[in-house]
Amino acid sequence: MSQKITINNKVLIVEDGLTILQAARANNIYIPTLCEDPRLEPYGGCRLCIVWVEGMPRPATSCTTPVTDGMVVKTHTEYIEKLRKTIIEFMLSDHPNDCMMCQKTGDCRLQDLAYKYDANYTKFVGVRRNYPIVDDNPFIHFEPNKCVLCGKCTNICQNLVKTGTIEMTKRGFYSKPDTAFSKPRTPENCQFCGQCISVCPVGALSERPSLGKGRRHEMKLVRTTCTYCGTGCNFYLNVKDEKVVKVTSDYDAVVNKGNLCIKGRFGYEFIHHPDRIKTPLIREGDGYREASWDEALTLVSTKFTELIEKYGNDSVGAFSSSRCSNEENFLIGKFARTVMGTNNVDNCARV
Ligand code: SF4
Ligand code: SF4
Ligand code: SF4
């Protein structure tokens, strides 16, 4: 079933069950948000997605309001835009506003919105939070004073990662995402998947190993597939000066929808490790010598052919790895059966 609604005087036929925000996005109508993520239950935390809905007594959060047939919505009235600007100014009133030194500059939703709405960061003056920076583990750097309390980090940790490492603690002005009893993150209480970092719209949570190594506009983004397991998650290598300095999520990836584990997000240092084997090695005597791919593959095929001619097709077999993608595992099976003529195919994930 579909619903007929009007957004900004435009009549739209939208799918049943959508929120106003989803219906607007599906029709390329921009509504600002800080706390929304399609993978998480919407909860109307940041209030920036408010819209005017005919018949409702006050502005409604578009991320939590379902569309109903005949609904008339306006997303950018003068009043709504003024409210949004005030919300941003409230956030800036208790924010370090040190964009010059911030790791997130150029990739910060708050910075973009402050610019867009011409927000004044000195309009509201009062008490400011003064929490120390949390830098107690090798992966996650947390600057609580930059937190805009959007709740995405705690939401993704609780409801998608499901470790429940962090939760919104304290109340009101003093609220902040934190571990139980403010204990350091350790392998016992945190997966170090960095999912919380990936959703943070501001510079409150950052990748510890990437600090000071470059900002978004300096990075060349290279989309690739993770080499650690057969799930084959996609992500972007952030490359600066020919060096990988960070991994960021690809939210359009069909396989993982932007989600990553610790290995995918932080396990990239091997790429530039001096001990990394970059060429095939052929055993000679007690050691190995480097060889070209042509030489190595010719040697392997010659040896396989000799074995098959001497002992028959079932004297050889193929073992593949769970680190390969499904497609690569399929190919090795196909190669064994159609080229080597054997069904001796196995994989380390079988048992
Ligand atoms: S989090 Fe954003 S707005 Fe805040 S200092 Fe950093 S770049 Fe500026
Ligand atoms: S790294 Fe993963 S497990 Fe740890 S707090 Fe962040 S989302 Fe939760
Ligand atoms: S740390 Fe970032 S993601 Fe978490 S609540 Fe604060 S602003 Fe939102």
Image (cartoon, helix red, strand yellow):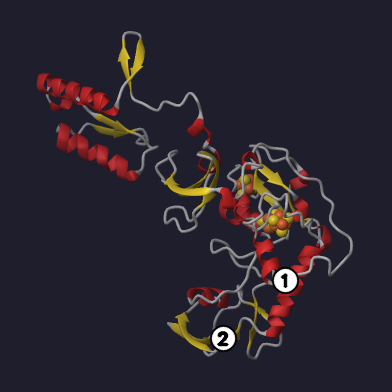
Question: Would you say the residues marked 1 and 2 are in contact, meaning their CB atoms lie under 8 Å apart?
Answer: no
Q: Which residue is mark 1?
A: 118
| Residue at position x 44%, y 43% in the image | 226
Q: Position of residue 107 (x, y in %)?
A: 62, 56
Dividing the picture into quarters, in which one does residue 317 lie?
top left
Q: Position of residue 309 (x, y in %)?
A: 10, 22
Displayed-image quarter of ligand 3: bottom right
Q: Which amino acid does the dot numbered 2 rest on?
A: Asn
**Quadrant placement of the C terminus:** top left
| Residue at position x 70%, y 52% in the image | 204
Tell me: 29 left or right of 212. left
Q: Is residue 114 visible?
A: yes
Please, which residue is most extreme toward the left here? 309
Task: Answer above or below: position of 64 versus 128.
Answer: below
Q: Position of residue 38 (x, y in %)?
A: 54, 64
Q: Which mark is residue 310?
A: none
Crowding around mark 2 (Cα neighbors within 10 Å: few <14, some 14 to 19, many 20+) is: some
